[in-house]
Image (cartoon, grey):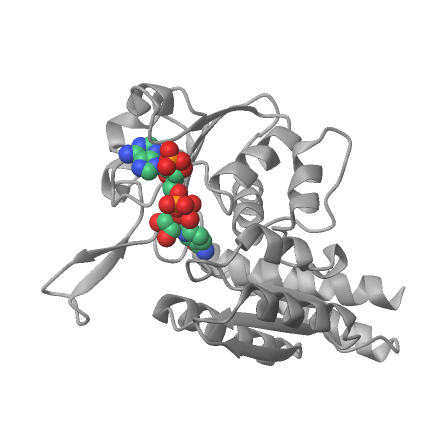
C-alpha cells in the first residue's frame, strides 16, 4: 500500500470527545443541556438503526435525545405538526427527520417546516440555498459532506485551486459536497448516471469524492496518481466467509486505489463515523447559539 489511510474512526472519536467537553463547559457556564429530537416515520430497518446509533452517541456525550416515532401511514399534517411542536420546544436545539421518508410524504415541505435555527442536518432549503450562494453562510452544513471536507483537510489535501470530482449528485451527499468544495475554492466537476466516460473524468481528479452507491465501481486505474480519495459509498456484498454473510465495501475498489492514491478513506471506518460526529457538533453549536 502506498496511500496514507485517512482514519475517520479516530478523527470522529476526537470530534466526539471535543463535543462531550463542550457540552460540560456549556452547562457549567449556565447554558442549557443540548437536546436533539429525532423523528422516525415508519419502520425502515436501516433508518431505525441510524436513529438508534445517533441517540446512543447523544447519551454518551451528555446530549439529551428525544425520540419520536410515527407510523408509516402518518399523514403529512401529522409529521409537520410534530416538527412544529419541536420547533417550539426550548429543550430541543436540533431536529433530525430521518430520511428517506415513506412514499407519499412531501419531504421538501417537511424539511422546510423545521426551524432553520434547529436544522442540525442542514437539509432545510434555506440552508442548502445559502450553501450554494457566494458570500452567504448556512447556519448548518449537512453532516456527511462536511465530514468529507474535514477528512480531506486532516489528511493535508490542498483544496484551493484543486481539480475536484464528485461522483454522485444526491441532495444529501453529492451536491452539498460539491458546493462545499466550491466554497473551499476547488474547481469542481459533478458526475452522475448520465456522465459520459466517468473514468476519464475521475482520472483528472486531484480530489475525488465517490458517493454513488455502486460497489467498487471506481477502479484503481481511474485514480490520478497522488489523488486524495474520499469514499462515501457503503455497499453490502455477499461474502459467505463473513460472519453475517456479507461485508461492506465502498464505491472505490480500495485494494487497487490504495496503490495509486496519496491518501484514501477505508470503508468502513472512513466517512461513516464522521456523520454522527458532525450531527453532535451541530447540536452543540445550536445549543450555544440558543444561550447567546
Ligand atoms: P443516491 O442513490 O441518492 O445517489 C447516487 C448518485 O450516484 C446519483 O446522483 C446518481 O446519479 C449517481 N450514480 C448512480 N449510478 C451511477 C453510475 N453508474 N455512474 C455515475 N453516477 C451514478 O445515493 P446517496 O447519495 O444517498 O448515497 C451514496 C452512497 O453513499 C451510498 O452507498 C450510501 O449508502 C452512502 N452514504 C453514506 C453515508 C455515510 O457514510 N454516513 C451517508 C449517506 C450515504 P443520478 O442523479 O443521475 O441518478
Quarter of the render that holds ligand 1: top left
- In this orientation, which residue lies closer to the viewer: 224 or 210? 210
Give me the residue at 75% from left, 62% from top.
Answer: 286
Say whether residue 84 is visible.
yes
Task: Indicate whether 76 appears above or below 29.
Answer: above
Percent across and percent down for residue 216 are: 25, 42
Q: Residue furthest left?
A: 240
- In this orientation, which residue lies closer to the viewer: 190 or 154? 190
Query: Is 88 left, or right, of 16 in this rendering?
Result: right
> Total number of numbered labels?
0
- In this orientation, which residue lies closer to the viewer: 14 or 73? 73
**Residue 66: which quarter of the image?**
bottom right
User: Which quarter of the image is occupied by the C terminus?
Assistant: bottom right
Task: Indicate whether 192 appears above or below 123.
Answer: above
Say whether residue 265 is visible.
no
**Residue 59: which quarter of the image?**
bottom right
Give me the residue at 48% from left, 70% from top.
Answer: 41
Percent across and percent down for residue 58 are: 59, 75
- In this orientation, which residue lies closer to the viewer: 195 or 185? 195
Give me the residue at 59% from left, 34% from top.
Answer: 179
Percent across and percent down for residue 102 are: 43, 62
Percent across and percent down for residue 185 are: 64, 26
User: Which quarter of the image is occupied by the N terminus?
Assistant: top left
Task: Indicate whether 14 appears above or below 157.
Answer: below
Query: Is 53 left, or right, of 14 in this rendering?
Result: left
Amino acid at each position: 500500500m502506498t496511500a496514507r489511510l485517512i482514519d475517520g474512526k479516530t478523527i470522529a472519536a476526537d470530534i466526539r470527545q471535543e463535543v462531550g467537553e463542550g457540552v460540560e463547559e456549556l452547562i457549567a457556564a449556565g447554558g442549557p443541556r443540548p437536546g436533539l429530537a429525532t423523528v422516525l416515520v415508519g419502520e425502515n430497518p436501516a433508518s431505525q438503526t441510524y436513529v438508534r446509533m445517533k441517540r446512543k452517541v447523544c447519551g454518551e456525550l451528555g446530549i439529551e435525545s428525544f425520540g419520536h416515532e410515527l407510523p408509516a401511514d402518518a399523514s403529512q399534517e401529522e409529521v409537520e405538526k410534530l416538527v412544529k411542536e419541536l420547533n417550539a420546544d426550548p429543550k430541543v436545539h436540533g431536529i433530525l427527520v430521518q430520511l428517506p421518508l415513506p412514499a407519499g410524504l412531501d419531504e421538501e415541505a417537511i424539511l422546510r417546516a423545521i426551524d432553520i435555527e434547529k436544522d442540525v442536518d442542514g437539509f432545510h432549503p434555506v440552508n442548502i440555498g445559502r450553501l450554494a450562494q457566494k458570500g452567504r453562510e448556512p447556519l448548518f452544513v449537512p453532516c456527511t459532506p462536511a465530514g468529507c471536507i474535514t477528512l480531506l483537510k486532516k489528511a493535508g489535501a490542498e483544496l484551493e485551486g484543486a481539480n475536484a470530482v464528485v461522483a454522485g449528485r444526491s441532495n444529501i451527499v453529492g451536491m452539498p459536497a460539491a458546493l462545499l468544495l466550491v466554497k473551499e475554492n476547488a474547481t469542481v466537476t459533478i458526475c452522475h448516471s448520465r456522465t459520459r466516460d466517468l473514468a476519464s473524468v475521475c482520472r483528472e481528479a486531484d480530489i475525488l469524492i465517490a458517493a454513488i452507491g455502486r460497489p467498487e465501481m471506481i477502479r484503481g486505474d481511474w485514480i490520478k496518481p497522488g489523488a486524495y480519495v474520499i469514499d462515501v459509498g457503503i455497499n453490502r456484498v455477499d461474502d459467505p466467509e463473513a460472519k453475517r454473510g456479507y461485508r461492506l465495501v465502498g464505491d472505490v475498489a480500495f485494494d487497487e486505489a490504495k496503490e495509486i492514491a496519496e491518501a484514501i478513506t477505508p470503508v468502513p471506518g472512513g466517512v461513516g463515523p464522521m456523520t454522527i460526529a458532525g450531527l453532535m457538533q451541530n447540536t452543540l453549536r445550536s445549543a450555544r447559539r440558543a444561550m447567546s
